[in-house]
Image (spheres, helix red, strand yellow):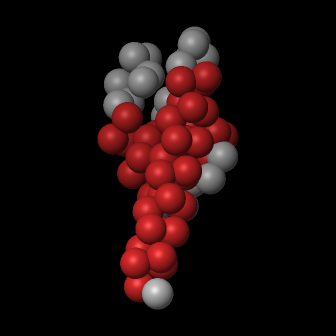
Amino acid sequence: MCHCAVVNDACVKDAVDCGAKSLGQVCRATGAGRDCGSCVFALKRLICEHEQAKHTTLLEVEGAAS
């Protein structure tokens, strides 16, 4: 993800799981995107994908319970 701050996708997912909801919050939590900024688009995509996966999983669990 971010080569400058040595932040990988697991760090980003952990930040989202701990409550970071925006790109800015993830960057503050992980240190990613602060130097050159070339990773911000990949970070944003990963944040969106992780949030979507969390919601999809919750819907599947709710559907199975009914």
Image quadrant in which you'd find residue 43 = top right
Asked if 37 appears above or below 54 in the picture, the reply is above
Residue 51, percent from left and from top: 54, 52
The residue drawn where x is 39% and y is 51% is 14
Judging depth in this view, the residue of 23 and 51 nearest the camera is 51
Asked if 65 appears above or below 49 in the picture, the reply is below
Residue 33 showing in the rendered view: no
Asked if 55 appears above or below 66 in the picture, the reply is above
Image quadrant in which you'd find residue 61 = bottom left
Residue 41 showing in the rendered view: yes
Horizontal arrangement in the rendering, residue 56 relative to residue 48 (left or right): left
Horizontal arrangement in the rendering, residue 38 relative to residue 54 (left or right): right
Asked if 55 appears above or below 40 in the picture, the reply is below
Q: Quadrant of the N terminus?
A: top left
Image quadrant in which you'd find residue 47 = top right
Residue 63, percent from left and from top: 47, 76
Q: How many marks?
A: 0
The residue drawn where x is 62% and y is 53% is 21
The residue drawn where x is 52% and y is 41% is 49
Residue 4, percent from left and from top: 43, 17
